[in-house]
Amino acid sequence: MVSTTEAHPGAIGAGRMGAAEAGHEVDGVRRRDFIYVATGAFAGVGAAAVAWPFINQMNPSADVLALASVEVDVSAIQPGQSIKTIWQSKPVFVRNLTAKEQQEADAVPLSELRDPESLADRTLEGHRNWLITLGVCTHLGCIPLGAAEGENKGDYGGYFCPCHGSHYDTAARIRKGPAPTNLVVPNYMFKSPTLVEIG
Amino acid sequence: MVRFLGFGAGLIFVIALLVGALMPREAAVEDPIKKIHLYPEAARWQQDGPLGMGVFGTYDRAQLQRGFQVYKEVCSACHGLERIAFRNLGALGFSEAEVKALAKAREVPSLDPQTGEPSTRPALPSDHWPSPYPNEVAARAANNNALPPDLSLIIKARPDGKRYVHSLLTGYDKPVPQGFEITEGLHFNPYFHSVAIAMARPLNDEQVTYADGTKATVDQMSMDVTAFLHWASEPELERRRQIGVATLIFLGILTVLAWLTYRKVWAGVAH
Amino acid sequence: MSFPWANHYEPKHPLMQWVDQRLPLPRLVYNAVGAGYPVPRNINYWYNFGVLAGVALMIQILTGVVLAMHYSAHVTTAFDSVEHIMRNVNSGWLIRYMHANGASFFFIVVYVHIFRGLYYGSYKAPREVVWMLGVVIFLLMMATAFMGYVLPWGQMSFWGAQVITSLFSAIPLVGEAVRTWLVGGFAPDNATLTRFFSLHYLLPFVILGVVILKIWALHIPGSTNPTGVDVKGPQDTLPFHPYFTAKDFVGICVYLMIFAAFVFFMPNSLGHPDNYIPANPLSTPAHIVPEWYFWPFYAILRAFTVNFLWIPAKLWGVIAMFAAIILLFFLPWLDSSRVKSTSYRPMYRIWFWVLVVDVLILAWMGGAPAEEPYVRISQIASAYYFAHFLIVLPLLSWFEKPLPLPNSIAESVLAKSGHRDDSTAPAAGAGHAGAAAAPAE
């Protein structure tokens, strides 16, 4: 291997370059560094700016976001019945609680609960009989049973998740099984006594 | 060997081509339509920007709203706008409540929740502009076998789209050339590719009443609806240009820095 | 590496030493595009286009993978999904316009790269394989671009698929069967769209593989240079990094500026308006043209108008169109001149520029309607295209008297930059002076 030229890859003119810059070596080094750093930094900023649209394109698109809220007509749901609807591609349970179910839920001391919330925390003032929750088990995301007629409502008369045996009570609070928290209550409001906007 | 084979192949190709080139041509039959057909007339919109270069141009919101009114009151009777959802109309400057009201005023196909029969319901902002006809067969049946095209992409789908649409809409007054027959049911318009178009003259003076008091001449309405349709084709236009200007400035600086780096690296090296 | 004076990779950091001993990837990069690859010091900006083609390929792969996340390959939804990308997906319009214009820019870069190779004799020994791999990439690019253009399922997509697949029906006896097999039906339909999507996703990675082979093959002899004189010693070369990385970076910046100008300000200027009309199998557009980068070959296809030697004109056109590309594989043996650079070939220089003009005319004719005088012009231009490669080039090699070549790259560099000779580094290479005119074989 020829090793003599290794240190001076730019053989031609290398000597001249040294001569020309010998007088301002300190100055020259500093300016060179500045340009290299500036170019590198600028290119880095550019690369980051280009990366963003490529990452952001995986976020929900405009048409998906446009479906962020739904309106549900609850006029046909009798006490003791519930319906399943879809909001943001997820099932939502809308349940018209009977007076008995509400009493059962209120009767449970909060200290007994894994995720202490009262029925009043989970419903709206003036609409205490309307229990609106996501139909997604907080354990691993299965859909609990109990919203449709004749389904297993679990040991506590609310919902029962068949995947890993989580039991929810009439306020959709976790009472038994592996799920860590109560079924999630989404943001919603009553636009009229029979029309609910979720989201 | 390769050279000899290549030489032979080359000769054959060249002879085959030159024989074709030397063959006498049959006298071309002149297409009478070509002589009558006109290219779109020059016109300029605000979004074309200064000098018509389109770099800094933005849509005129008032014009877009007027154009939307023309589309809604005139064109939408026959032409769909299926790629525009009501929620998109917010970009024209309509408030959320106005968009909801605009949507609610139109019926979209639906299913009756009780019987499952096909039915309609008032549109929501997330719905798309409903088509005037349920399908192509119905559209043709209602229009003397002509199909009114959907207008969502019309400006991008025609060469020199804006000027073409504007010229077409205002081109109904040209006199039919001597000796040129227009088929029954078609209308003479020299800007249309076959110069005989199924669409009857769509715009007449004062056909719509603009809320902002602009005088509704045919030319004005045509300019407005063309601007609106341009927006429908390219809703991303303004954002695209903004990002474009920023990108070019950035790349310009980066190019200068790259050049300085290059000069520095190569300083004193002969090449 | 075939340059004994190339820098050697010596990792300083213990971590890099650890990695290098186990997976010498940093070493590979160092030798491929780092300081370990010596490059002729006199190559000019035309030599940037190889790297630019790599950049263009990467842009296509990146944007393409992203588009495939939102695209739907079905005849009923393909067009809608493209419009969904344009209107609803975050920055979707940007990514799609980058991909569509990126294809055109990839071809621009590759065409310049090919003509640079033709001018500086980059196809000649010992770089024949580099050149042939390049032709393979070119063919793969054409297939990929054609299938990609079908995917939006607009009018030009559909009729382009119809016309191009019909070419195969010109093959005697089995033509119709081949075409039916290609499109998976009797006309382009869903089966065609789905297989084109699959292949359009696959082929760019095949191209990437061939690109790696090509770079590998290139690194054996190294790049050509504007003098065409072989590299003789360390005074003729500079390490790729930092000299040519810095130079290529300038080229990339300029390229990106022009690219951005198209993407942001005239994104549809290189496309055809008809492709914004959904495909309609019952109505052909008035004037079908392929994308501009196919125009020269489309002109050759249409230039054959008479049956000749019992072969029908349609088959002639198809044969000639493929032959126009295939003949490039034989170029290293068609041109037997030992002088590589056209700068030292006074006669060939003229013919080279005639070829450039000829291909531009062919491109213009390919985009023009099939009527006179365009047909006749394209016939004459096509005839020259074949004559150039198959007749003129081989003959020139015999007749032409080349200009005297410089003794070495270093000498030519110093003569050009007007430097005095006194600073010329080590006397290496002087002994080779006599061999310069006839590169070693």
Image: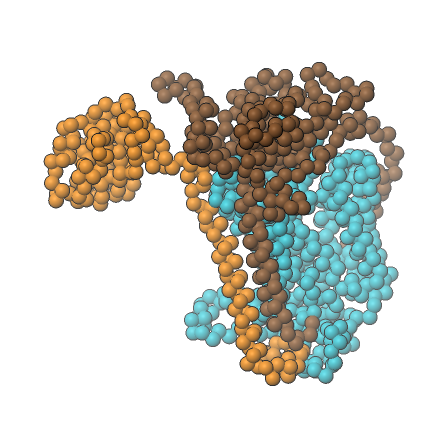
In which quadrant is the N terminus of chain A drawn?
Answer: bottom right
Which color was chain C given?
cyan
In which quadrant is the C terminus of chain A drawn?
Answer: top left
Nearer to us in this view, C308 or B182: B182
Tell me, yes or no, if residue B67 can be seen here.
yes
Tally the marks: 0
Residue C420, x across and y down, in percent: 74, 81
**Residue at left 43%, top 24%?**
B122
Looking at the image, the residue that sits furthest to the top is B184
**Residue at left 62%, top 35%?**
B155
Which chain is displayed in orange in the rendered image? A
Which chain is displayed in brown in the rendered image? B
Quarter of the image for residue C115 reads bottom right
> Is residue B231 shown above or below C415?
above
Tell me, yes or no, if residue C8 can be seen here.
no
**Residue at left 64%, top 80%?**
A17
Quarter of the image for residue C366 reads top right
Judged left or right of residue B126, residue C238 is right
> Is residue C135 shown above or below C6?
above
Nearer to us in this view, B217 or C26: B217
Residue B185, x across and y down, in percent: 68, 16
Residue C35, x across and y down, in percent: 57, 71
Looking at the image, the residue that sits furthest to the front is B213
Judged left or right of residue B40, residue B264 is left
> Is residue C120 shown above or below B4?
below
Residue C186, x across and y down, in percent: 61, 29
